[in-house]
Amino acid sequence: MTKPQLPAPPALPELPATGSLWRTEQLHSAGLNSRAIAVLVRHHELVRLRYGCYIRATLWERQKPSVRSKQLILAHAHGTRTTSDGAFVYSHISAARLHGLFVWNADNAIHVLLRTRPSSGRLGKDVRGHTRAFTEADVVAIRRLRVTSLERTVVDCALMLDYRRSLIIMDNALGQGANPALMRAMADGIPGRRGVKNLRRVLENADPRSESAGETLTRELLQRLKIPMPEIQFEVTSRAGRHRMDFAWKARKIALEFDGKTKYFDYAPTDEVLYQERQRENALTEEGWMFLRLKWQDLFNEGEFKDRILAALRRRPEPRAC
């Protein structure tokens, strides 16, 4: 006795052939009603980024975390195109992301700067509104979006975030060419404001030579634990070529390298890069250099971090002057 054949499952509604980011009304215009949109979301063909804005799932799934954070900002801009007069400016963490700055340990809320405080609930649950006064000199265009300038962005972040997250953003911004004198003038213009002490401290301790958030956090930890400071981005030549160390105690021939870029910042060195790096390290080891390597978790076990560094410094005291 043959089993009765089950009816074929209904075909899924089809997404528009072109485009990847749509407002609800755009999907409706393409023939997809609210039920069809819900079916596509349920079957992971469509991803709801925020109220009234959707993205093609295949695009969303292949994006890296840092790209997704920017995509959420673009979704906000796309979703508000027909509901806003465009008077707001992307600011704080959102502006930092649009400027391509390192953002560590922050959520994906959308930050906007407004002339006046909006009524409750107008902005949406995923949006944070700020009203510190600004002029058009504080505004630049990035991807056709109105965004706070690099300097204004860093200042706003330092007024809002804690010291370490602010320092990461400041280091990176200085490396991109941000003007420290302009930011100091901004700090002088808001005496007594909440967060201004943090801003001044960050300006005092920032270093544009840090090439990753991990390097900034390593430097901050060395300073806070009162460990003798190494040279930063120290260059040395060996038979295998030039090598730039994240940190180095030159006289002791101790190098400190941060290896945790991959997990947090989408940086994945190729096999060839890793091979060349290992060749240079082997050549420097032959010349007497000792390498200490750090991972992200090492930065949050401060007692072990300090013991490890001090033990290496004790094993290799500075040579006595002749």
Image: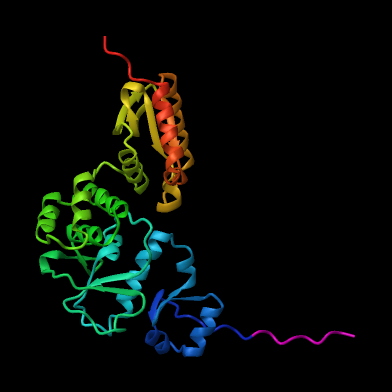
Is 6 colored magenta in this rendering?
yes
Is 19 colored magenta in this rendering?
no
| Residue drawn at 60 percent across, 84 percent down | 11
Q: Is residue 71 above or below residue 280?
A: below
**How are the residues colored?**
rainbow
List x then y, in percent, for residue 255: 38, 30
| Residue drawn at 51 percent across, 79 percent down | 41
- Can you tell which quarter of the image residue 210 is in? top left
Q: Which residues are magenta?
A: 1-9
Q: Is residue 143 above or below residue 202?
A: below
List x then y, in percent, for residue 137: 10, 65
Q: Quadrant of the C terminus?
A: top left
Q: Can you see residue 240?
A: no
Q: Can you see residue 274?
A: yes
Residue furthest top as drawn: 322
- Can you tell which quarter of the image residue 195 is in? bottom left
Q: Is residue 236 above or below residue 180?
A: above
Residue furthest right as drawn: 1
List x then y, in percent, for residue 222: 33, 38
In-image side of 157 versus 316 (left or right) = left
- Can you tell which quarter of the image residue 116 is in? bottom left
| Residue drawn at 26 percent across, 66 percent down | 143
In-image side of 303 versus 45 (left or right) = left
**Number of numbered tags placed on the structure image:** 0
List x then y, in percent, for residue 252: 35, 22
Q: Nearer the viewer, residue 162 or 144?
A: 162
Q: Quadrant of the N terminus?
A: bottom right
Q: Nearer the viewer, residue 46 or 285?
A: 285
Q: Nearer the viewer, residue 259 or 143?
A: 259
Magenta span: predominant SS is loop
| Residue drawn at 26 percent across, 62 percent down | 160
Q: Nearer the viewer, residue 72 or 6?
A: 72
